[in-house]
Image: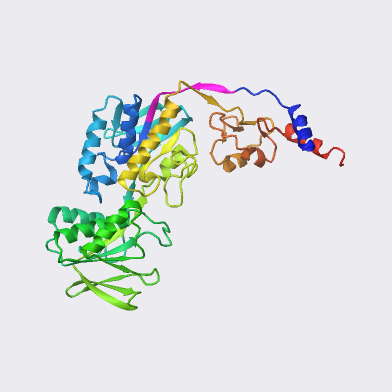
Amino acid sequence: AKQLVHMAVARAAKLAALHEKRIPVTPRALVVGGGVAGMTAALSLGDQGFETYLVEKEKELGGLARRLTKTIEGADVQSLIQDLTDKVTNHNNIQVLTESLIVNSSGFKGNFNTELIVGPTMYERKLEHGAIVLATGGSEYQPTEHLYTESDQVMTQIELADRLDNQGAGDLSSVVMIQCVGSRNEDNPNCSRICCQSAVKNAIHIKEENPKARVFVLNRDIRTYGLLEEYYTKARELGVIFIHFTPEEPPQVTQGEDGLQVQVRDPILDRPLSIDADIVALSAGLVAEDTEELAHILKQARNEEGHFLEAHVKLRPVDMGTEGVFVCGTAHSPMLISESIAQALAASSRAVTFLSQEYLTLSAVTARVDADKCAACLICVRACPFEVPRINEEGVSEIDEALCQGCGVCASECPAKAIELNWYEDVQIESEIDALLEGVL
């Protein structure tokens, strides 16, 4: 304890006063993506009095939800989309920019500058805003397995739901559903979370409309989490047959003379089964939209599957690594519509914590560069987890103190000792070490 106090006193003698800076906040928000999550976030921000830009790359708002019919609870998805679209397009605080692409972005929390190409005339527009909400959404995995591209009788759960909505289930005698298509494999080891409830929803629809139809759900396991378990129980009571299979022996779909046949080995009966099917429905997983270029422009991290990666799964679940940037909906991970709405409200609430302030205070504990020592070796540029350092026009490293997170990685990596972290300067650390070693050496 005495040595620690001695070291602290020695370091205090070398400390210099640091001054925090205050920057004004631009009280506007940018929401990227016009799906359910994006529109919900935009409405939340607009209702709280903040001007909001809603940017969507497609011609129409709605995203993947435009292809959906009903939720497993029975809610009409198209009515929800229409209601959200009407509200955002007629909201005084929301500007909707469809057919628009982000081509450049700069700035920092409270003061972002984003450049767009806005269609259909493809004119350039620059936006100034204080926060960004990423809601770029996801899309359904397009299967290549189980004869999907070869037979009209093989379809995804979204396509089956659309068929049931338009044609009903009266003409169906046997339907086989295959779970985990495009998920929980070597290419995509994660569960897409929404597939099981989609299968259970369509199975219940078929059995309620046509009780004589046989419905088989071939699965590795059924993950109807939370209260969705009630719908799984209901499907069992209606007579839906759930058959387990192992990854080593997945189902095989073949085209027979009289239609489709599905072969699967039942581990309980310990023998192979062959099932004739009018329709084979593939529970295709949800994959992230192609956001590689957008992530590069905004300097945001993504996981291996292409979804945007939050700063901390427990402490900052909707915050990105860059302060002032937030994520929600299936841009973050596969989730239900209800979960997307909840996360969109969370992201907009976090954005308001920035936009509601007239000024933001910047931390004084940031890295600084000694231009005389810098060799422009690019090590700091590669090492920084937040992509803050850059080589400026003078050929030396430059670190924007508004973007710097004060992690000190660049200072520890710089071979020329050209970078130091305020409050943790070399002379201060050396004084602590000297105090520790007094009387030893």
Coordinates of residue 375 in the picture (x, y in percent): 66, 36
Observer-nearest residue: 296 or 155?
155
Residue at 34% x, 24% y is 49
**Which corner quadrant holds the C terminus?**
top right
The extreme bottom residue here reads 271
Observer-nearest residue: 34 or 99?
34
Q: Is residue 48 above or below residue 101?
A: above
**Which corner quadrant holds the N terminus?**
top right
Coordinates of residue 304 in the picture (x, y in percent): 46, 52
Residue at 26% x, 41% y is 62
Q: Tell me which corner region of the image, top left, top right, bottom left or bottom right, holds residue 118.
A: top left
Observer-nearest residue: 163 or 75?
75
With 171 as the anchor, is 249 left or right in this view? right
Main secondary-structure element of the magenta-colored stretch: strand
Q: Is residue 185 above or below residue 368?
A: below
Q: Is residue 186 above or below residue 69?
A: below
Residue 34 visible to the viewer: yes
Is residue 338 one of those drawn in magenta? Answer: no
Coordinates of residue 411 in the picture (x, y in percent): 65, 37
Observer-nearest residue: 146 or 93?
93
Coordinates of residue 282 in the picture (x, y in percent): 28, 61
Query: Where does the magenta region start and end?
Result: 20-29
Residue 199 visible to the viewer: no
Is residue 28 one of those drawn in magenta? Answer: yes
